[in-house]
Amino acid sequence: GTRILTGITTTGTPHLGNYAGAIRPAVLASRAPDADSFYFLADYHALIKCDDAERIQRSRLEIAATWLACGLDAERVTFYRQSDIPEIPELTWLLTCVAGKGLLNRAHAYKASVDKNVEAGEDPDAGVTMGLFSYPVLMAADILMFNAHKVPVGRDQIQHVEMARDIGQRFNHLFGKGRELFTLPEAVVEESVATLPGLDGRKMSKSYDNTIPLFGSAKQLKDAIARIVTDSRLPGEPKDPDSAQLFTLYQAFATQEQSTRFRDELQQGLAWGEAKQQLFGLLDAQLGEGRERYAELLARPAELEDILQAGAAKARRIATPFLGELREAVGLRNFR
Ligand code: TYM
């Protein structure tokens, strides 16, 4: 079958961007007859960005509940926490030893921190941890451990998947003896939602504080939508759907027909207030059911724990023997 793999960092409450960019396509893909899917909570990645232990713990629970509330069938896929798979940090080390520093110097997240420091006239690496610098190597280990073919992600993660490819290729070249030890992965990006905008029009992101929570209450959803920034065109004045994040958000959740009708209405002068009500109606109808299941799941953490433990055992049935092969390939075989 086709191996599909993706993860979400457990630093916050899942938002519409995570859903449209990763969760929705991943759940859909997992239902294809030949799909063999690996979905996980990237909680080691979370430690790179966050030193608030309570928040990480809470987010792990919320993101686990979110996947299941979105219809993921944990029996059909392999659903686990990264930190329950000790083979992953071990593989990270094997990969660290072949990953070029020059390659990692080019990683967007690291470069963004350096650029910010330089602009502020500070030491370029001020506040940069080795975790941040090595972030793409840990992510390469996530992907290569399970020989994923396809990695459904939003646009911001494409570079990381390409780095996983590079690192895997180098490892194959050095240790494969002509054999492909690692499958080289490919990012799968759904163009229409590759970068879902947030309330202010920038990419929806925890770090910009411009998110719409996926399973907040109806009131939270309404309040967030009220904060979507629009231009100052008055009711009756034609609006430009293509420059309005409100329309992009609507489109990401609507049928083709609904989008066309909404576009026409905006161009004919629909008031922004009305438009916000329509967006609320659309999202509330689509997320209502999931919201209820999400609340039920959050109330049963022991059950979630059982599901994740079973998932970890399933993942390790692949990871443990494969890591054994990799250890041998690099010269860490036992003496017997
Ligand atoms: P993270 O947790 O930042 O985001 C999870 C997924 O959501 C997507 N996403 C978006 N898509 C569209 N529009 C947006 N506004 C938006 N915001 C977020 C992200 O692209 C991502 O697909 N490093 C990863 C987690 C990770 C991972 C992996 C992913 C760790 N190991 C291995 C794939 C494979 C991250 O921090 O995603």
Image (cartoon, grey):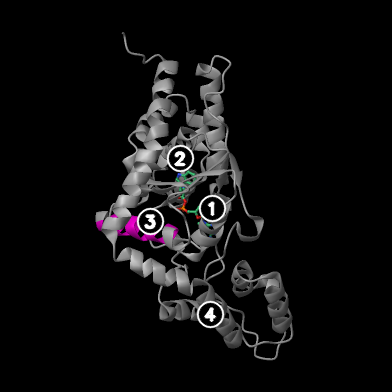
Please tell me whether residue 144 belongs to the stretch shown in magenta: no
Relative depth, front residue between 209 and 221: 221
**Looking at the rendering, which quadrant does residue 25 occupy?**
bottom right
Image x and y of residue 191, in percent: 66, 56
- Lower position in the chain sequence, tag 4 or tag 2: 2
Which of the two discs, 4 and 1, sits closer to the camera? Answer: 1
- How far apart, in angstroms, are the residues tagged by discs 2 and 1? 17 Å
Q: Are marks 1 and 3 in contact (CB under 8 Å)?
A: no
Magenta part of the chain:
54-67
Q: Quadrant of the C terminus?
A: top left
Q: Amino acid under label 2?
A: Met
Q: Which residue is mark 3?
A: 64
Residue at image mark 4 = 280
Q: Secondary structure at mark 1?
A: helix
Foreground tag (4 vs 3): 3
How far separated are the C-alphas under marks 2 and 3?
Answer: 19 Å
Residue 242: image location, x then y, percent? 69, 71
Q: Which residue is mark 2?
A: 139
86 w.r.t. 81: above or below: above
User: Quick one: label 4, few (<14), some, or many (20+) residues within 10 Å?
Assistant: many
Q: Is mark 3 within 8 Å of ligand 1?
A: no
Q: Earlier in the sequence, mark 4 or mark 3?
A: 3
**How far apart, in angstroms, are the residues tagged by discs 1 and 3?**
14 Å
- Percent from the top left, x then y, of residue 198? 53, 67
Amino acid type of the residue tagged 3 in the rendering: Ala
* Mark earlier in primary sequence (1, 3): 1
**Viewer-proximal residue, 129 or 300?**
300
Numbered mark located on residue 26 in the image: 1
Q: Residue furthest top?
A: 336
How many other residues sit within 10 Å of disc 3, few (<14), some (14-19) or many (≥20)?
many
Q: Earlier in the sequence, mark 2 or mark 1?
A: 1
Q: Mark 2 vs ligand 1: CB under 8 Å?
A: yes
